[in-house]
Each structure stands twice: as C-alpha cells, then as structure tokens.
Image (tube, helix red, strand yellow):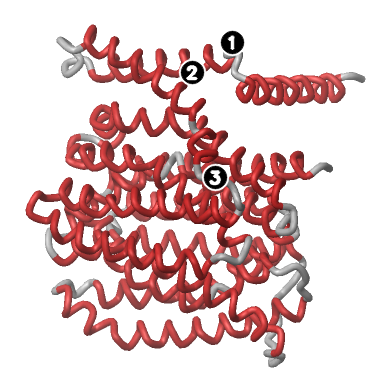
C-alpha cells in the first residue's frame, strides 16, 4: 500500500471511530441533558479539572514517545507500564487523602465521595493508555476505532440508566468508570497481551526526554483549556459551568476529523522525517481537506446555535447558544493549531511549541478573568483569543520546521473558504426571507437552512472544476464504485 493510500486508510478508520464517538456522545448527551441539570454537568467538570491535570503526570508522555520512536521492543512497553501504574497508585492515594479538604474548599460535601470514586480511573488508565499506544503504533486503527465506539456506547448506556434512576451526577461518574474498565478489558483481549511489571529502566530513560516534552506541552494545553472552567467553577458556579461545557462540547464536534487527521498525520510525518517534500505535501493536504469538511459544520454552529440548542436540549440550555456561536467562530483557528502541532511533534520541535503554549495559557487566564464582568460570553471571548494567537504562531513554526513559506498555508485554505462563503451567502439570503417568522417556526427554519446549505455544498462538490475538489471527488467516486463492486461480488452465487 502506498504512503498516500496508507494515510487515507488510517484516517478513514480513525475518522469512523472519532465520528462514531461524536455521534454517540451527541445522542447520549441529548438523553443525559434531558434527565440531568446543568449543575450536574458542572459538578462533573469541576472534578475533572483536577483529575485531568493529574492524568498528565500519570501518563508522563511516554506513551506518545513509544509511538514516535523509530524502534521499540515489548520490554519497553512493560517498563512504561510499570512506571504509569506506580504513578497511578500514588495519584489515587493522594486524591483519596485530600478529598475532604476538596469538598470543604468548594463548600459541596458530595465532592468528597465523588472525587474518591473518580480517582479509581488512575488504576485503570495504564492498561488503556499503553495498549492504545501499542495498537496505534501497529496501525491497528480499525480495532482502536471499534473499541472506542463500543466503550462509549457501554459508558453512555450505563450513565443513561443511572440518570433515569435519578442518580444525578453519580450517573456521569460511574458511567465513565464503566467505560474505562470496558476499554481496558477489550484492549487486553484484542491485543493478546497482558502488560508485565518490569525493573528495566534503561530504555525508559531513553524515552523520557521526548515523553517529558510531550507531557509539558500537553499539560500546558490542558491548563489552557481548563482555565475558563476553573474560573467559572469558583465564581459563577456549577450551573454556568455546565452551560459553558455543553457549548464547548458542541463546538469541538467538527474537531473529530481534525483529531483523526492529526493522529495519522503525526505517525506518517514521524516516519517520513527525512523526506521534507513529502512532509510538506502531507501537512498542506491535511489542512485543505480538514478545512473543506469542517468549515460547513463550524458555519452551522455559528449561524444556527440557538435553534439547535433549543431543539435538542430544551429551554433550560438555551443560554449556552451565544457561547456556542463564539466558540464555533474560533473553531477553524483551533484546527490550524492542532495540525501545526502534528508537524512539531513528529519532527521533534516540541521545545519550540512549549513557549507558545505558555503564552496562550497566560492569555487565557487574563482573558477569562477580565471577561467575568460580562458574564459567560465575556469569559468565552476573553479566553478564546488565545486560540487565534496560537494558530498563527504555531502555523508559522510549522512552516519554519518544514522549510516552506507561510503563505502556502493560506493558499491551502482558499478553496475551503470559497465553499463556506458560498453557503454563508445563501443562508444570508434565506435569512432575509424567513426572518419575519423564523422565531415562531424554528424547527422548519432549522430544517430548511440545513437542507439548503447541505445541498449547495453537495452541488459545488460535484460540479466544481477546481483541481483539488476534482481530485477529491474522483477518490469518492472510485471508493463508491469499489464498494458497489464488492457488494455485487458478495451477492453473486
């Protein structure tokens, strides 16, 4: 299989897995949002701020180091597993000890038991993390995709049942634990390998440098993402935090494609570190395709946030719609930042990325605190300005790393921008027609806008003479023909 075909095959399975996760998360989220309150979700996010922070210490970045390394042995995995399990046990003990203080600090007694139970995940994570890295390095993307989707289905079903039984925030905590345990069991069975304890640290030390850089970088990204949540949890309360989190969960839906492309592109760029022209092609192609397919989704959330939130979640969640509008508007910048990050990670330029993440963290904190006087929307606007800065700086670093002019990145965005602009102009015209009655018939308005926008995108995709779209269209047609041919072969006696 060629490099291009390998990338597309890997992206296809990772996309199927990520899309499946997004669809299931969306459907489960609708059910849980109807059964639970914004305050329940806010309590969960408050706990996840701290457990997620500890998760970076538990992982140590060494899992990604195993993926990035040119050669690894089974003993390397065992050494990393031993380190991660030891750290996980220490983290669990620490959270168990500080839980009473944590509950007192927030003034919510329930946080004591919630934090202790949540911390059990650190005893499961070493199995999930290590075996996922093992499967990813082996390019078993299909297995990973199926495992992740199935685990999410199991977790969501568990949470929904418990929520229906009126378990409140406990339904979210226990559902997440059930999903993690299910994932660990299935990965062990699919890999045919049970990680062993090891005292051979020689290779682990060799992986530690890259792992440390990954940890620092991911740690800063996490702090940046969680800073608004922390500010809201300590000021406006769990209800506002729940609204903010729900809007953010919608805004990242298009990033399922970005994440899929990031994962596979990172692996391929790591393999092609010595082929500069090939690396440039992979990166620019990834930008164009991701922007082409995610652009309409971001535009949808910008334009139709309120009717979407009202239809799927109900009136109690409508205050989240202005937040969704703004976060979706910033979404393309996050896409650019993520794809630039795949270049820097694959080519061992993480030491150049860390200062950018530090600057973004500072901007987020100052923006979130400064925006408090304007409420939830002020926090969202203030915090997300860091993403714009990060996208520009990271893209410039990626261009330097690949030794190409930065204008080539802008050139890669021309076609997607034209496509999205056409949909926006169509909706602008339709909005003027439907404006007098759209508030009274929001479901009809929503369905009409989505149908017209989707139809225009399809028509442009099918008839556009632009070379990039022609090439992509031909690949879709060839894939469809192959699929039909396979179906005919299976149906033949």
Which residue matches tag 2?
Answer: 457
Q: Residue at x 46, y 54 (%)?
A: 394
Answer whether residue 37 is visible to the viewer in this image: no
Residue at the extreme left of the image, as rendered: 373
Q: Quadrant of the N terminus?
A: top right
Real-space Cα distance between discs 1 and 3?
31 Å
The tag on residue 405 is: 3
Real-space Cα distance between discs 2 and 3?
30 Å
* Vertical side of 446 occupied by 19: above or below: below
Q: Position of residue 211 (x, y in %)?
A: 57, 75
Q: Which element carries disc 1, helix, strand or loop?
A: helix
Which residue matches tag 1?
Answer: 463
Q: Nearer the viewer, mark 1 or mark 2?
A: 1
Q: Along the polypeptide, which appears first: circle 1 or circle 2?
A: 2
Residue 309 in the figure: left or right of residue 412: left
Q: Residue at x 68, y 59 (%)?
A: 270
Q: Nearer the viewer, mark 1 or mark 3?
A: 3
């Amino acid at each position: 299989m060629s490099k291009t075909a390998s990338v597309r095959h890997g992206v296809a399975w990772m996309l199927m897995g990520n899309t499946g996760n997004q669809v299931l998360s969306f459907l489960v989220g609708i059910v849980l949002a109807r059964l639970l309150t914004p305050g329940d979700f806010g309590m969960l996010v408050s706990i996840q701020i701290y457990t997620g922070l500890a998760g970076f210490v538990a992982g140590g970045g060494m899992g990604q180091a195993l993926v990035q390394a040119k050669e690894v042995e089974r003993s390397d995995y065992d050494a990393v597993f031993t380190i991660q399990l030891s750290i996980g046990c220490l983290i669990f003990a620490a959270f168990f000890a500080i839980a009473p203080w944590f509950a007192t600090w927030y003034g919510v007694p329930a946080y004591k038991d919630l934090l202790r139970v949540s911390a059990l995940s650190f005893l499961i994570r070493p199995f999930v993390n290590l075996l996922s890295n093992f499967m990813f390095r082996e390019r078993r993307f299909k297995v990973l995709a199926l495992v992740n989707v199935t685990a999410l289905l199991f977790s969501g079903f568990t949470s929904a049942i418990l929520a229906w039984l009126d378990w409140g925030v406990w339904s979210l905590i226990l559902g997440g634990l059930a999903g993690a345990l299910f994932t660990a069991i299935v990965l062990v069975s699919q890999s045919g390998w049970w990680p062993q304890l090891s005292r051979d640290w020689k290779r682990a030390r060799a992986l530690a440098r890259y792992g440390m850089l990954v940890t620092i970088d991911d740690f800063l990204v996490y702090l940046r993402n969680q800073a608004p949540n922390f500010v809201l949890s300590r000021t406006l309360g769990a209800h506002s935090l729940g609204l903010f989190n729900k809007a953010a969960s919608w805004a990242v839906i298009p990033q399922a494609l970005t994440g899929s492309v990031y994962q596979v592109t990172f692996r391929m760029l790591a393999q092609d570190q010595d082929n500069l022209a090939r690396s440039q092609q992979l990166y620019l192609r990834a930008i164009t395709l991701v922007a082409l397919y995610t652009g309409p989704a971001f535009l949808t959330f910008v334009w139709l946030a309120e009717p979407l939130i009202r239809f799927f979640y109900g009136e109690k969640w409508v205050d989240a719609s202005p937040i969704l509008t703004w976060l979706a508007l910033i979404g393309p910048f996050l896409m650019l930042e993520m794809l630039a990050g795949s270049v820097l990670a694959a080519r061992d330029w993480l030491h150049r990325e860390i200062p950018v993440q530090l600057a973004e963290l500072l901007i987020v904190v100052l923006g979130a605190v400064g925006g408090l006087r304007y409420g939830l929307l002020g926090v969202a606007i203030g915090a997300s300005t860091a993403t714009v800065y990060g996208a520009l700086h990271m893209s410039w670093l990626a261009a330097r790393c690949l030794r190409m002019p930065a204008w080539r990145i802008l050139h890669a965005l021309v076609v997607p921008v034209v496509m999205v602009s056409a949909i926006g102009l169509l909706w602008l015209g339709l909005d003027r027609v439907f404006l007098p009655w759209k508030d009274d018939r929001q479901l009809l308005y929503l369905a009409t806008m989505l149908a017209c926008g989707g139809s225009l995108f399809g028509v442009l995709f099918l008839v556009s003479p632009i070379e990039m779209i022609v090439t992509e269209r031909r690949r879709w047609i060839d894939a469809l023909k192959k699929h039909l041919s396979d179906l005919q072969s299976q149906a033949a006696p």
